[in-house]
């Protein structure tokens, strides 16, 4: 799909983030600007301390910029109140974490239903929607299983189902394959790609995993708080073996 045919979902303009440590100021992000398109799979890559996690958190409305702004679906995040931000996060963004963050005493259905209940959905409807989305990610046979009764990959699928529960336009996945073996990690990458291509979710991952490269539409490389380069998948696949993080 050509750039001209893409709908801009996220606008990032002159984004900067500074942390005042008292004896010094750390510039985590410096004048970052880019557009992220609806339905694309974007991977954010870079060495530890490069600023990619800070950038990731800005897009997810988990942190606020020192300068510049992030606009998502027409909403400039810095202009939203705390209440409006909470509503925005709950209804527009689904979060997937490398440590799964499931509640051990809750089965798969209840873990996925929780954000629906928080948003005011009646229990019976929340359970039905949770079971539907668990089936969608291949866990229709694990609806009543507790987290410690399923594999790590299945736990991550439950976490992805939870992120999908409110049908958000954006899925933010923070190192989603970091705690998984090679085969299971590949399965999770395939699932995320399907969510992008088949269901139109915008997938944004912060990752060190080179297997993400082939699935991504674009790769954003961050270095020293700045955009080092933005590459399309075709540009990366040719030299994937020589990419150096």
Image: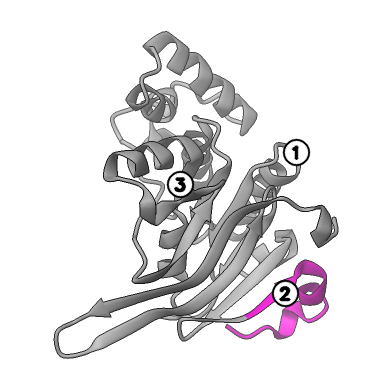
- Using residue 13 as the reference point, say whether residue 243 is left or right of it: right
Disc 3: which residue: 95
Q: For label 2, count other residues whose C-alpha is less than 10 Å away and answer few (under 14), some (14-19) or many (20+).
A: few
* Residue 51, image x, y percentages: 44, 76
Q: Answer with mark 3 or mark 2, whichever residue precedes in sequence.
A: 3
Name the quadrant containing residue 69: bottom left
* Residue 20, image x, y percentages: 21, 80
Disc 1: which residue: 198
Which range of residues does the magenta coloring cover? 229-245
Instruction: Name above or below for residue 62 compared with residue 195.
Output: below
- Using residue 145 as the reference point, say whether residue 233 is left or right of it: right
Disc 2: which residue: 231
* Residue 77, image x, y percentages: 42, 52
Q: Answer with mark 1 or mark 3, whichever residue precedes in sequence.
A: 3
Instruction: Name above or below for residue 113 compared with residue 228.
Output: above
Please state which of residues 214 and 64 is positioned toward the viewer in this rendering: 64
Q: Residue furthest bottom?
A: 23
The residue at 70%/66% (across/down) is 218
Q: How far apart in space, not on screen, are marks 1 and 3 (Cα)?
A: 19 Å
Q: For label 1, count other residues whose C-alpha is less than 10 Å away and answer few (under 14), some (14-19) or many (20+).
A: few
């Amino acid at each position: 799909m050509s750039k001209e045919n893409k709908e801009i979902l996220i606008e990032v303009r002159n984004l900067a983030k500074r942390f005042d440590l008292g004896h010094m100021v750390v510039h985590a992000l410096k004048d970052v600007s880019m557009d992220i398109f609806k339905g694309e799979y974007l991977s954010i890559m870079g060495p530890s301390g490069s600023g990619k996690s800070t950038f990731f958190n800005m897009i997810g409305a988990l942190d606020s910029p020192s300068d510049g702004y992030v606009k998502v679906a027409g909403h400039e995040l810095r202009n939203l109140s705390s209440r409006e931000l909470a509503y925005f996060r709950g209804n527009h963004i689904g979060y997937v974490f490398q440590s799964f963050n499931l509640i051990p005493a809750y089965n798969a259905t209840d873990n996925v239903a929780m954000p629906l209940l928080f948003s005011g959905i009646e229990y019976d409807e929340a359970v039905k929607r949770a079971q539907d989305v668990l089936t969608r990610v291949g866990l229709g046979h694990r609806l009543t299983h507790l987290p410690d009764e399923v594999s790590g990959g299945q736990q991550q699928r439950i976490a992805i189902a939870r992120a999908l529960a409110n049908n958000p336009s954006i899925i933010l996945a923070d190192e989603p394959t970091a705690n998984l073996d090679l085969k299971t990690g590949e399965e999770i990458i395939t699932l995320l790609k399907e969510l992008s291509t088949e269901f139109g979710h915008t997938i944004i991952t912060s990752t060190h995993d080179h297997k993400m490269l082939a699935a991504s539409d674009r790769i954003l490389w961050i270095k020293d708080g700045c955009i080092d380069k933005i590459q399309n998948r075709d540009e990366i696949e040719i030299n994937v073996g020589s990419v150096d993080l």
